[in-house]
Amino acid sequence: MVTHRMNTALAKAIIDSGKKKQTIARLAHISPWVFSRTLNGYYILTAARRARLAKVLGLSETDLFPEE
């Protein structure tokens, strides 16, 4: 059985940014589907995607993905 857990750090960063999830995904060059799956704990982003997402949100990768 595979368990998943929502990435609460990423969810908080999205809310704090004031941007729509779709906008953040587009700016980070991540498909909305992959972005949603990542947020809900079903998908693990590559290092390159994590770096782009962190840059868009103005945070470090460890801020967004503390458990990885």
Image (cartoon, rainbow, N blue to C red):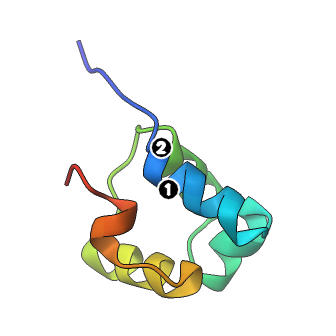
Q: Is residue 6 left or right of residue 13?
A: left
Residue 37's tag is none
Which structural element holds mark 1? helix
Residue 10's tag is 1
| Kind of residue at badge 1 | Leu
Q: Is residue 37 left or right of residue 43?
A: right
Residue sitting at x 38%, y 47%: 43
Identify the image quadrant of residue 28: bottom right
Quadrant for the C terminus, please: bottom left
Q: Position of residue 63 (x, y in %)?
A: 35, 66
Q: Is residue 42 left or right of residue 21?
A: left
Q: Position of residue 39 (x, y in %)?
A: 51, 47
Dot 2 alpha-carbon crowd within 10 angstroms: few under 14, some 14 to 19, many 20 or more: some
Residue sitting at x 35%, y 79%: 60
Residue sitting at x 64%, y 61%: 14
Q: CA distance from mark 1 to mark 2?
A: 5 Å
Identify the image quadrant of residue 50: bottom left
Which structural element holds mark 2? helix
Q: Are discs 1 and 2 less than 8 Å apart at CB?
A: yes
As drawn, the residue found furthest toward the front would be 16
| Kind of residue at badge 2 | Thr
Q: Position of residue 45 (x, y in %)?
A: 35, 62
Name the residue nearer the viewer: 21 or 26: 21
Q: Position of residue 26 (x, y in %)?
A: 69, 77
Query: Would you place residue 45 above or below residue 38 in this image?
Result: below
Identify the image quadrant of residue 46: bottom left
Q: Which residue corresponds to mark 2? A: 8
